[in-house]
Image: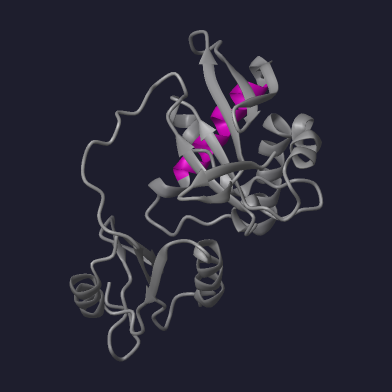
Amino acid sequence: MLILEQSGGKTTAQQPTITLSIKESGAPPNSTYLFHISLDGHPILTNQSLSLPDSETVRQISRSFGSLFEQSCRPEMEAGAEAALGAQLFALFLASSWEKICSAVPSGSTRFLTIASDAPEILNLPWELLCPPGGEFLGLDPLFAIRRLPGSEKKLEPFTGELRPRPLRLLFMACSPRGPAELDYEREEEALFRAVSGQDVAFDSCDLGTFEELKERVSEYRPHILHLTGHGVVRDGKGHFAFEKEDGLTNA
């Protein structure tokens, strides 16, 4: 479904939004998850319920994935485990309606996948790993943008402040010091650039990956959004972001 909006005398296409709304029903340990799927507000799948075993599987996935970030080491999973996890999440929530969703969304159009829930264990699931059969992770698919929002029953307070003048300024910085595994930040930067192409966005990037450069560029450029990618290190039980030094070594 493609929605056209009239703005300033011009007709523009609004990106389709697939919303997966999930809420918990009942009290633990016997609670289950209810969900429905809509496309631009129009129901695709309604009043669906996971079984008690499947609901417990979802909670276990959330606990296991969250525990990766509580260890004093880099949170990593094997590629096969990531693919299996993504396929499992897809089968639980999207498999039965995926064909209908794909047929309703124009081919080649970018689209949002919104996860709407008030349950922290749902919002913390690795939705970027969703993996349709024969496809790639949705988090790596340039046609998808995944976002998490509170459940639809909770209304966000309207914004009453003053918006900054356009364009939206976006600053990209990649830090890849020698030593840790090399980052494919050029691919990430290219994907980010494609995502904002055609929008009212001013895009700029840093060159050195040092903290001093970041402070200087933020002061000069005053970005609305800073996209920072790099490695983290854990020292004495505390996490640190690994900026580069001028010699290319880590400054964490």
Q: In the rendered view, would you say 143 is above or below 169?
A: above
Q: Main secondary structure of the magenta part?
A: helix
At 28% across and 79% down in the image, what residue appears?
210
Q: Position of residue 250 (x, y in %)?
A: 32, 79
Q: In the rendered view, would you say 241 is above or below 104?
A: below
Q: Position of residue 8 (x, y in %)?
A: 45, 50
In this view of the protein, which residue sits in the foreground, 45 or 53?
Answer: 45
At 54% across and 46% down in the image, what residue appears?
146
In this view of the protein, which residue sits in the foreground, 212 or 38?
Answer: 38
Q: Position of residue 1 (x, y in %)?
A: 70, 38
Which portion, as a residue range, is magenta? 54-67
Q: Is residue 244 visible?
A: yes
Can residue 66 be found in the magenta stretch? yes
- Quadrant into which the C terminus falls: bottom left
Q: Quadrant of residue 241?
A: bottom left
At 28% across and 84% down in the image, what residue appears?
245
Q: Position of residue 117 (x, y in %)?
A: 48, 27
Q: Is residue 174 visible?
A: no
At 76% across and 51% down in the image, what residue appears?
107
Q: Quadrant of residue 224?
A: bottom left
Q: In the rendered view, would you say 121 is above or below 249?
A: above
Can residue 72 be found in the magenta stretch? no
Q: Quadrant of residue 112?
A: top right
